[in-house]
Amino acid sequence: MNFKVLTVGCKVNQYESQAVREYFLSNGLVEVLTGPADLYLINTCTVTQQADSKSLKLIRRSRKQNPKARLVVTGCLAETDREKIKKAGADLVITQSKKPDLFSFLNPQKPSPNDIWSFRVKNFARNRAFVKAQDGCNNFCSFCKVRIVRGGSKSRPLREVLEEIERLADCGFREIVLCGINLGSWRIGKMSFADLLEKALQIKSLGRIRLSSMQPQYIDARLLALMANSQKLCPHLHLPFQSGSDKILKLMNKKVSSRFYFDLISEIRKILPDCGLSCDLMVGFGPEDAEDFRKTLRLLRESQAVRSHIFTYSPRGTTDLASLSGSGSAILKKRAFQASCVAKEVSFQFRKSQENKIFKIVFDSNLNDPKMLGYSESYIRVLVKAFKNEPLIRDPRRFYRARIRSTDFNYSYAEIEKP
C-alpha cells in the first residue's frame, strides 16, 4: 500500500505529520509525493477561516484524485467540524485529542498509546528539523480556538526533548527548531523553559537552536542572556503581538498592554541589537478603528521586524467574540495592504542594517538550483548564487559563512566566505 501525507498549519502539525509518516514507512508502506495514493492522511488546521477552507479543499482534492482511496483526516479542524470533514469526503476522522490513535491505524489489534508524547521523529525532508516540546495553551484569547481544540498546556518530559534534539543533531541537522503551541509555558516541576534551553545548549553535537513563536510574556532577562551568551541559540524571536492598541488587546484578552510590548522591544534591542524579530499582527479585529490601526502600525515600525505575518480577523465559531463582524471588508483589505507595505519597509530597514556582516547560513532550497535560499541566525532570508562546480555549496546539512552584500525589498543577497 502507498500513502500520502498532507499537512496544513503550524510547526507542531508538521512535526506530528512527520512522526506518522515515519511510522507508516517503518510498517512497510511506500510514500508517494505526486499522483494518486491508496491512503491519504490529511492533518488539518483551524486557526483561521482560510485554514479551514484549505483543509477542506485538500480533502476534496484527494478524494477526486483517487475516489477509491482511504482518506483519514485528523488535526485541529477534526476536533470541531467532523460533519464538514465527512461531507468533504473523509472515510475516517480522528480528532486532535485522539491523534495518537494514528499509530494503531495499521494494526487495530495494537493498543493506542493514548499519549501525545508518543510522537517521535528521526528525519525531516527539509534541512531544518523540528522538535516538539510543548502542546496546548492555558490562555483564553477571545479570537483563538487553540485552547478549545488542543486543551491546556502540556509539557514534554525533559529527557525526551533532549534525546530527540541530540538524535537529530547526530543525524546531521545543523538547525533544530524547538516548537510548541505555547512554547514558553513549558514547565516540569520547578524547571522552567530557560532550564530546558540551558540543558539543550550543552549537547555537543548541536549546531544551533531556533525558537518558534513565543508569547511576549515569556521573554525574560534570563532568556535574552542565553541568546546573548550562546552562539548555539539563534538571536531570533517570533512574537505574536496581534495589535498595538490597548483597547483591542483588552478585547482580545491578551492580558498585556502596548507599553509592555514597546518596553520589551527596547530591552531586546539593548541586549541584542541585531536580534531578528518577527511578529504576527491581526487587522480588523472587532471594533478596530483608524486610531487602533495607527497604533498597530506604530508597533510594527518600532519592532523593525525582519518578517511579519499580517492576517485579517476571521470569526471562529466557538470563541468568545465570534459574533463580532470585524471591520468592513473594503476597509479591512485597505488596512491589510497598508500593513503589508509597512512590514516590507521595516524589514528592508532592518536587513539593510545587516549588510557587510557575516552570518552562518542553513540552506533550505534544492542544491541544484542556480540560486540558493537559506536563513541566517537572525532569520534573514538570504539568497546566494551557487557557483558552477563549486564544492563548497554541496552539503545541505552544514553551516556556510556568508556576507550580506546588498538588500532589496525581496531578499538579502550574500556571498559565501571561503574557509
Image (cartoon, rainbow, N blue to C red):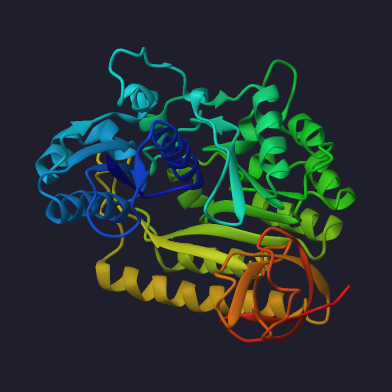
In the foreground, 224 or 295: 224
Q: Is residue 221 left or right of residue 66?
A: right
In the displayed structure image, the side of residue 58 where residue 212 appears, left or right: right
Q: Position of residue 312 (x, y in %)?
A: 37, 61
Q: Is residue 320 visible?
A: no
Q: Is residue 181 left or right of residue 305?
A: left
x 72%, y 52%: residue? 264
Q: How many marks?
A: 0
Position of the N terminus by quadrant: top left
| Residue 385 in picture, x, y percent from top left | 66, 84
Residue 121, by quadrant, is top right
Q: Nearer the viewer, residue 23 or 399?
A: 23
Relative to residue 46, is residue 95 depicted above or below? Answer: above
Residue 69 appears in the picture as rendered: yes
Q: Residue at x 85, y 53 (%)?
A: 231
Residue 75 drawn at (x, y percent): 34, 37
Asked whether, in this view, residue 304 is left or right of residue 107, the answer is right
Residue 72, how many percent across, how many down?
Answer: 24, 36
Q: Is residue 358 above or below residue 84?
A: below
The answer to which quarter of the image holds residue 155 is top right
Q: Residue at x 16, y 52 (%)?
A: 60
- Position of the C terminus, as image quadrant, is bottom right
Which of the 4 image quadrants contains residue 134?
Answer: top right
Work out whether 247 lies above or below 311.
above
In this rendered view, identify the residue nearer to me: 298 or 45: 45
